[in-house]
Amino acid sequence: MSPLESGAEQTRKQRREQARADRRALEEAQASGAARLRRLQLLGGTVAVAAIAIVLVLALTGGGGKGGIPSSRTVKNEVTAAVASLIGGIPQSANALGKPQAPVTLEYFGDLECSVCKAFTEGTLPTIVRRWVRAGDLRIEYHSLETATREPETFKKQQTAAYAAGAQNKAWYFIETFYHEQGEEGSGYVTESFLDGIANQVPGLNLAQWQRERGDQKFAAEVEADAQTSSNEGFTGTPSFMIGRSGGAPSKLGTGNLPESTFNEAIEKLLKA
């Protein structure tokens, strides 16, 4: 390896370490807020409600699959139905969700193992999709940024699997399903079996074609291009966002599980421009 290549690899490693540190700080802040809320709830006499919530969580995760991954076929079917309800019928092309002629484009940088990305995907994203994407005003492009995933090879494997589904215009089914069935960080849950399971839940995906295309170098190159873009923009955490008029130069919107109002205001402003 040449000194230049060695320096580039070191820079990528430093970016990954910084991204993990930033994400951990964000998660700790959110966990601290959640802890305060729980204490208030307990003081307000909601112990019984909390106990019921725990039972519901266990039920929804199918009785405790590894790292919280649903082990029940019933729960997996519910996930598949929920994802289809959200994005079914919306045009997809490679990594993009939404009509190609939509006037505004949101660029979403995420790590499929990032718990903050999962919170965004299950919380704020559905309202954005229903209000803006289905109306044809917004298209969303998904880009990768390694933060939570500890092994670079695992990160590349899971992301190229998503992009390979995009070759059949089904990347967002894969991405959404992955986030909904995300396991515990650091548990090593992302195996070939796990990725095959996600692919099997993507409606209409040609599995044989998907398996063949996963190794296509163009998808690995896309992951590298995402890393370069995020580095150029100074992103070190996920989820991170850029937004702009389609076909124009986007601007930074922010990092973290941003409130819905942040997206609504930016979209409205661009639509009026």
Image (cartoon, grey):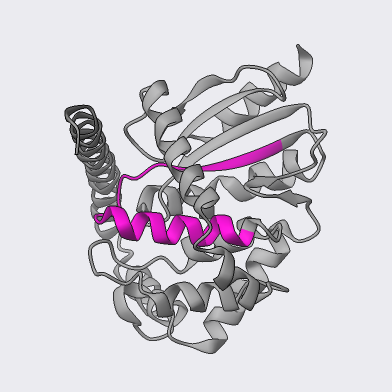
Q: Estimate the x, y position of residue 187 in percent, counting from the top left.
A: 24, 69
In the image, the segment drawn in magenta is 139-165
Q: Estimate the x, y position of residue 233 in percent, counting from the top left.
A: 42, 22
Q: Quadrant of residue 41?
A: bottom left
What residue is rendered at 80% in x and 41% in y?
A: 99
Q: Is residue 168 visible?
A: yes
Residue 208 part of the magenta-drawn span: no
122 and 137: which one is in front?
Answer: 137
Residue 164 part of the magenta-drawn span: yes
Q: How many marks?
A: 0
196, above or below 21, in the image: below
Residue farthest to the front, as pictured: 2
What residue is rendered at 59% in x and 25% in y?
A: 243
Residue farthest to the top, as pictured: 273
* The N terminus, quarter of image: top left
* The C terminus, quarter of image: top right
